[in-house]
Amino acid sequence: MDLVKFQKDVDEMTKKLSKNLDKNQVSKLNYVCQQLIEMYKKNLVKINHSILELICATNLISRGYAVDVEKDVSEILVCDIFGKKGGGNTIIEIETGFTPPDHAMDTIDYFSARIMSKIARYSKHCTKFSLATPAVGLLPIANIFLLPPNARKKEDIQKIKDLCDRYYKNPPIEYDDILNAHLHSIFLINIDKGLAKELDPQGYVDLTENLLGRSEIRY
């Protein structure tokens, strides 16, 4: 653990991100920065993920949200970013595409199940749920999450549950959580420029479909 290096890096990024914020917004971002420093002292966060959280937090703060990071939303879930504005709230979960060595032989299925499970588990705890990823990564978004719940077929929901059940058993992903899950948007993060661009899920799927070969993969 190198607290001095961590604090230097998050301070530097915070100053960079503050340039286009007003005084009140800078105060909100400094609060997030301090949260991350305190969590690093407890060995709860790492620098690469913290930088991504700062960038996404700035996007929300610039739009009037108050932001917390690494916030408990249930007894078993901690979200990356929690934003609140008025009577609504939003959760952003950041995905870097990392898969553990145990899943070297089933990387795509494991990663797809993880994305599906996050949408199903987190979206019921917020008004708007979003995923975020560095611009160098691609997220496999299942087509079912582009449809409203009343348009989702039972067999498609069961296929997703069957896949998630291969990797998530304690607790399992519930059928109704998949049925009612909602995905508001996806943020593409440009780390070098300190920017997060928000896309609607359909636009993101259209953008990445050919690269992911999704014409041959259906969930």
Image (tube, grey):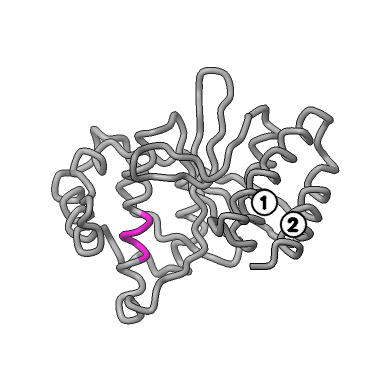
Label 2 is placed on what type of residue?
Gln
Tell me if mark 2 has few (under 14), some (14-19) or many (20+) residues whose alpha carbon lies within 10 angstroms of its own: some
- x, y percentage for residue 32? 67, 41
Q: Is residue 215 above or below residue 75?
A: below
Secondary structure at badge 1 equals helix
Mark on residue 37?
A: 1
In magenta segment, residue 43: no
- 91 in relation to 12, above or below: above
Q: Is residue 153 above or below residue 46?
A: above
Who is closer to the viewer here, 15 or 75? 75
Q: Which mark is residue 7?
A: 2
The residue that appears at 52% across and 53% down in the rendered structure is 94
**Span highlighted in magenta in the image:** 111-115
**Kind of residue at badge 1:** Ile
Query: In the figure, 61 relative to 117: above or below?
Result: above
Quadrant in which the N terminus is drawn: bottom right
Q: Where on the picture, by quarter, is residue 40?
A: bottom right
Q: Which secondary structure, mark 2?
A: helix
